[in-house]
Image: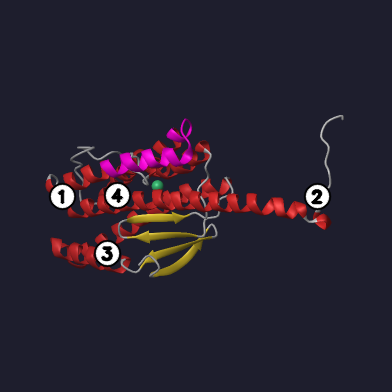
Amino acid sequence: MLGWSINLFRIFGIQLAVHASFVLLLVYAAFEGWRDGGGWAGLIASVLLTVLFFVCVVLHELGHSLTARRYGVNVPRILLMPIGGMAEFDRIPRQPRAELLITIAGPAVNFAIFVVLAVLIGLPPGLPFHPQIDDTLKGFGQVLLYWNGLMGVFNLLPVFPMDGGRIFRALLARKLPYLRATYVAAFVGKALALIFALAAAFWLHQTMLAVLFAFIFFAGDAEYRMLVRREEEAACWAELARRVRPTERTTPDEEPPLIVHGPN
Ligand SMILES: [Zn+2]
């Protein structure tokens, strides 16, 4: 399903792509803008806000991607889906410090946009829970300011594989083996994702949010299983290499040169 995407353009050499279902999201945004009494102006404003929201998502993902590159990680693509963005890394560094900095860079971009907009246009009254935003150009900026604040905070929830969960894993990995740290982070993440999904569905009555947490629940589980599989494969290759090497040494032509360490 994730393969059904449309390539847009390259940014810093990274292919930006949108999932095909993104078109449905834009149609839905247009319909909402029209229905809420805005007519054509409402339709355009709603679509424009949706596009600008995803521009902020791309900037968040670029925060991760450009920091990851500094650690030698190749980032071929950033994929946008209606539920958010995903930077595709060829590997995730196992040094806790690298993972920590790569992960923090995403929400840091959102907080930077929040601060810049707050300085330029001021904070809307009623933050954080009941922001009062009017239908002016300034209100447009304040919606973006509010969304960036939410995006930064939401991503820092310790629900693996969201940013907060990755930060939690990196902190655990300073004391625990990497796989064990991932197991604990994924376990805590799944428990929290389940609680948040139920709270979103039955308490807040936010269906999309419940679906998002259900998606995160399965994504955390899938990433942990993938890591276990890779570890098993690596152990298998290591065992194979260990078995093959002694027979190589018995072949006289391939006898390795004797290397003597030290003064003797
Ligand atoms: Zn992120």
**Which of labels 2 and 3 is toward the front?**
2
**In the image, which is nearer the foreground, mark 4 or mark 3?**
4
Q: Nearer the viewer, mark 3 or mark 1?
A: 1
Question: Dot 4, crowdedness within 10 Å: few (<14), some or many (≥20)?
Answer: many
Query: Quick one: SS at disc 2?
Result: loop
For mark 4, what is the residue? Answer: 217
| Residue drawn at point x = 21 percent, y = 55 percent | 208
What residue sits right under mark 3 in the picture? 25
Residues at marks 1 and 4, CA–CA distance in whole angstroms: 15 Å
Q: Residue furthest right?
A: 264
Give the Cα distance between marks 2 and 3.
Answer: 63 Å
Q: Dot 2, crowdedness within 10 Å: few (<14), some or many (≥20)?
A: few
Q: Residue at x 17, y 62 (%)?
A: 38
Q: Which one is earlier in the sequence, the residue at label 1 or at label 2?
A: 1
**Do tag 3 and tag 1 residues touch (Cβ < 8 Å)?**
no
Whole-percent x, y for residue 138 in the image: 28, 48
Which amino acid does the dot numbered 2 rest on? Pro
Looking at this view, is 78 or 263 the one in front?
Answer: 263
Q: Quadrant of residue 34?
A: bottom left
> Quick one: SS at disc 3?
helix
Mark number displayed over residue 62: none
Q: Which residues are magenta?
A: 172-191
Query: Badge 1 local density, few (<14 within 10 Å), some, or many (20+)?
Result: some
Q: Which residue is mark 1?
A: 201
Q: Is residue 175 magenta?
A: yes
What is the C-alpha distance between the residues marked 2 and 4?
51 Å
Residue at image x 71%, y 54%? 247
Task: Give the CA separation, mark 1 to mark 2.
Answer: 66 Å
Q: Which amino acid lies under the numbered mark 3 shown in the image of this protein? A: Leu
